[in-house]
Image: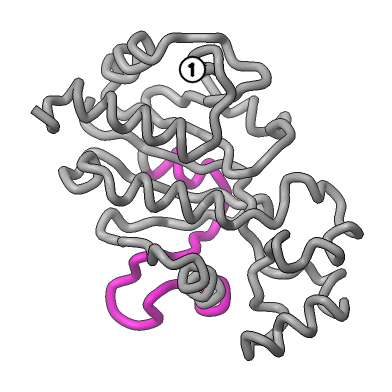
């Protein structure tokens, strides 16, 4: 394996939808943080009552999932040794390029502020080398850039059960495998996401959240590659 591509799919990360911009909950929150409502990051913890009006609400407003996932990925020894490249695909069909050198803020509020800046400016930092940037196109843009030789979807709903050991060995058999993993709290992937995958797996018997799955996959890969030895 030359390197692994991680694509956080249908991620629950977005700015305030147009239909909620006039909601009193959103206006109060924007005043509290002194930010334009359209650049607030939708967060169920603060915007729950407003989100009731949204379609597909059960999959939205959970940027904490992406925060935890990025902390897990970007602090791994695999990233520090150049083995992992990360992208985020949002529920609004936005692609975010994550530079391997980025170290996400550990404080959640600082992370939210960074994401707000990203959606406003299209990149962070606004000048110099971008550590996070919004790309044009859709998921196929990532495929064209990375040219993975296997696209694997990890999914608890339709995935074929596989042990962690067998999964790691399977990953290692490809030059540039790409793992798609959900960045949302509940529900299933869209049909279009399933259509992108060569394989759909569920690791083990237990349902795990995104950060837990990533932690285990990255750790076992570090062991297999001899990075921890």
Q: Image quarter for residue 99?
A: bottom left
**Residue 47 falls in image quadrant:** bottom right
Check the image and report above or below for 205 versus 11. above
Q: x and y percent of residue 104 in the render?
A: 37, 62
* Residue drawn 56% across the image and 18% down it: 206
The quadrant where residue 41 appears: bottom right
Seen at 33% across and 45% down, the residue is 85
Residue 7: percent from the left, percent from the top?
Answer: 47, 41
| Residue drawn at point x = 73 percent, y = 45 percent | 59
Vertical side of 217 occupied by 71: above or below: below
Where is mark 1, residue-wise? 203
Which stretch is magenta?
Answer: 119-145
Task: Name the spot of residue 48 as percent of width and height, x first.
Answer: 80, 61
Q: Is residue 142 magenta?
A: yes
**Which of 151 and 80 lies nearest the eye of the viewer?**
80
Residue 89 on the magenta span: no
Q: Quadrant of the N terminus?
A: top left
Query: Is 165 displayed left or right of 68 in the figure?
Result: left
* Horizontal and vertical percent position of residue 138: 57, 49
Disc count in the image?
Answer: 1
Q: Secondary structure at mark 1?
A: strand
- Looking at the image, the residue that sits furthest to the left is 229
């Amino acid at each position: 394996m030359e390197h692994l591509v991680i694509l956080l799919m249908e991620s629950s990360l977005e700015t305030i939808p147009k239909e909620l911009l006039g909601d009193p909950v959103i206006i109060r929150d924007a005043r509290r943080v002194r930010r334009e409502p359209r650049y607030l990051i939708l967060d169920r913890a603060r915007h729950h009552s407003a989100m009731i009006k949204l379609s597909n609400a059960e999959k939205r407003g959970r940027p904490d999932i992406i925060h935890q996932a990025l902390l897990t990925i970007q602090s791994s020894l695999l990233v520090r040794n150049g083995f992992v490249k990360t992208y985020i695909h949002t529920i609004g069909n936005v692609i975010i390029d994550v530079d391997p050198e980025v170290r996400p803020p550990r404080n959640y509020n600082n992370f939210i502020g960074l994401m707000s800046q990203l959606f406003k400016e299209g990149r962070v930092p606004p000048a110099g080398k971008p550590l996070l940037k919004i790309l044009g196109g859709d998921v196929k843009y990532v495929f064209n850039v990375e040219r993975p030789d296997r696209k694997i979807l990890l999914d608890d709903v339709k995935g074929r059960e596989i042990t962690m050991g067998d999964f790691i060995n399977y990953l290692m058999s490809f030059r540039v495998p790409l793992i798609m993993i959900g960045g949302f709290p509940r529900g299933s992937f869209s049909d279009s996401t399933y259509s992108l995958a060569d394989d759909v797996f569920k690791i083990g018997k237990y349902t795990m959240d995104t950060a837990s799955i990533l932690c285990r996959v990255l750790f076992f890969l570090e062991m297999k590659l001899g990075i921890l030895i």
